[in-house]
Structures are given as C-alpha cells and as structure tokens.
Image (cartoon, helix red, strand yellow):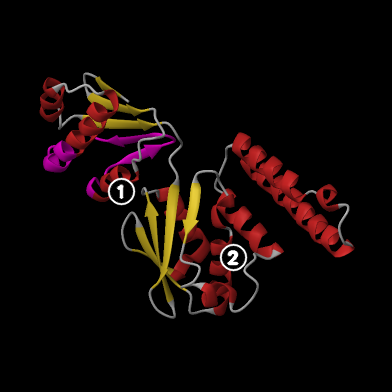
Amino acid sequence: MQILLGTNETIIRINSQSIKIDFIQQFIYKQFIDTTVVHNSITIPSSFDDLHHRIFLLKWLYGLYSKKTSNQFLELKHTLVKRAHKQIRIEIKEKIIYKIYYSLIDKDNLEVKVFPKNNTINDLFISIFKKNIKIINQTKLTINYSEPKTKEILKKVLLAEENIFSNHQHIFNKEDMKNFLFENEILKPTEQQSTFGLFHFTAGKTDKTMLKKQYKKLAKEFHPDRVSDQSSETIDLYTKKFQNIVFTYELLLKKAS
C-alpha cells in the first residue's frame, strides 16, 4: 500500500488483494455524491462540504497503511488530515465491479440499486424499460413490471446475471425472487433469455477488444464440439446457442464500428 502526496491530490494505491476494501467503497459511494469511478480508480473531487467524512476516510486509509507497512508515521496522519479538502484518488489492484442489487418492493415493483453510481447503467435501464422506470437518485431506481411484456423483459435482464461484462454483477436473493423469475421452471436461463441479456447489456459497449474477448469466451463455452460425444438433443441445444452467439456478436460488432 502506498500514499502519495501530490500538489492537488492525495493518491492511495492499494496493491494487495489481502486488503478488503468493500466497506470503504460502500462508505465512499454513500457519503460522496460526486465520486467518479474509472476502471480501478475511485476519485473524490476536492471539497470542504463533506470535510468530516473526508477526514474519517483518510484516517481509515492511514490505519490500513500503518497496519500493512508496520510504519506508525503520526506526522503523515496529521498531514493527511490537513490535506483533507484536496482531491482523493484511490487506486486498487483489481478492476472495480459494478454491483446491481435487485429487491422486490411489491407484486408490481422492483427496486434496483447500482454501486458505485453509473449513469451509463441508468441510461441502459431507461432505454430498456422506458415509461415503466423511475429514477430515484444516481444509485437507485424502481421498475414497474405490471405489464406482462415488461415482466418478461425484466426476467431476461435478471437472468443475464454477471456474464455480460467482466465488471458488472447482478445480485438478488434467488429464494425471495424464485417465483417471480422462474414460476416453478427449472432454475436455468433459456436460449432467448441469455441472448437478450447479452445483447442489451453489451449494446452500449463500443470497446471492440472487450466485445471480442466476451465472444471468444462464450464461443468456447458453447461450441458444439464440446458435447460431440453426448446426445443429439444436447448437440442441437449447443448448436443453436452457438449460432445465436455468433449472430449477436456480428450484430454488436457492426454497432461498435
């Protein structure tokens, strides 16, 4: 772990996977409304408005630093507090995962929370659900699924789970939502559901490298040759899946051009 004191910002580099920063991230996303996240970097812009939260965060990070390095630099702690109003940038080893939490409010509404805040994800939900969605704030929205068509679309989005992008994860309690999602069906996404999720969550991505990487991963996983020694029904299932993946990839590749 490193602490760098720049002229206009304080940089905290967390290079060890042994440091669990989930709680720190949750604190940041909750307390600092102007936070920006890019790949593996969290930036809190300079401000005096939330100074007590900034001081608390810096002391917390200093505590991790002194524990990890066995260096008790009290002067550094005081220096960090004096610089609390400056921009803070936290760099972590792994790419930051966008977690999308779902919970049922009632028989017609679903609450969605996105951490950290991501306007692109919000825009994606708006484009999919249009008039049936309500934005509460930058990290929270609700979806009304009283219309059968909307409910079916919502199922397909939920069943996509975390396999769409490497930095998106869909989280919901499968027991609580079992009847809503599957209605006593086998707990397994159908062909159309998986492809729908792939298409909608990847449609806004213009990074061809990421798109090709995802395509190779899916193509390898569902290539019919993998099940050549199994039943004809299984081979047919994998063949259809593979064809669907190829079609979706070619379509998205054109959109990314």
Tell me which residue sits at (48%, 75%) in the image. Answer: 145
Tell me which residue sits at (50%, 59%) in the image. Answer: 127
Proximity of marks 2 and 1: CB atoms separated by less than 8 Å: no
- On the rendered image, what quadrant is the N terminus found in? top left
134 displayed left or right of 74: right
Q: Nearer the viewer, mark 2 or mark 1?
A: 1
- On the rendered image, what quadrant is the C terminus found in? top right
Instruction: Give percent across and percent down for residue 157.
Output: 55, 62
Instruction: Give percent across and percent down for residue 253.
Output: 67, 42
Residue under circle 2? Answer: 156
Write down the quadrant of residue 140 in the picture: bottom left
- Determine the secondary structure under disc 2: helix
Q: Is residue 19 magenta?
A: no
User: Callout 2 environment at 10 Å: few (<14), some (14 to 19), or many (20+)?
Assistant: many
- Determine the secondary structure under disc 1: helix
114 displayed left or right of 215: left
The circle drawn on residue 180 is: none
Picture layout, residue 4 above or below residue 148:
above
Q: Nearer the viewer, residue 74 or 137?
A: 74
Residue under circle 1? Answer: 26
Residue segment shown in magenta: 31-56
Picture layout, residue 61 above or below residue 221:
above
117 displayed left or right of 206: left
Write down the quadrant of residue 188 in the picture: bottom right
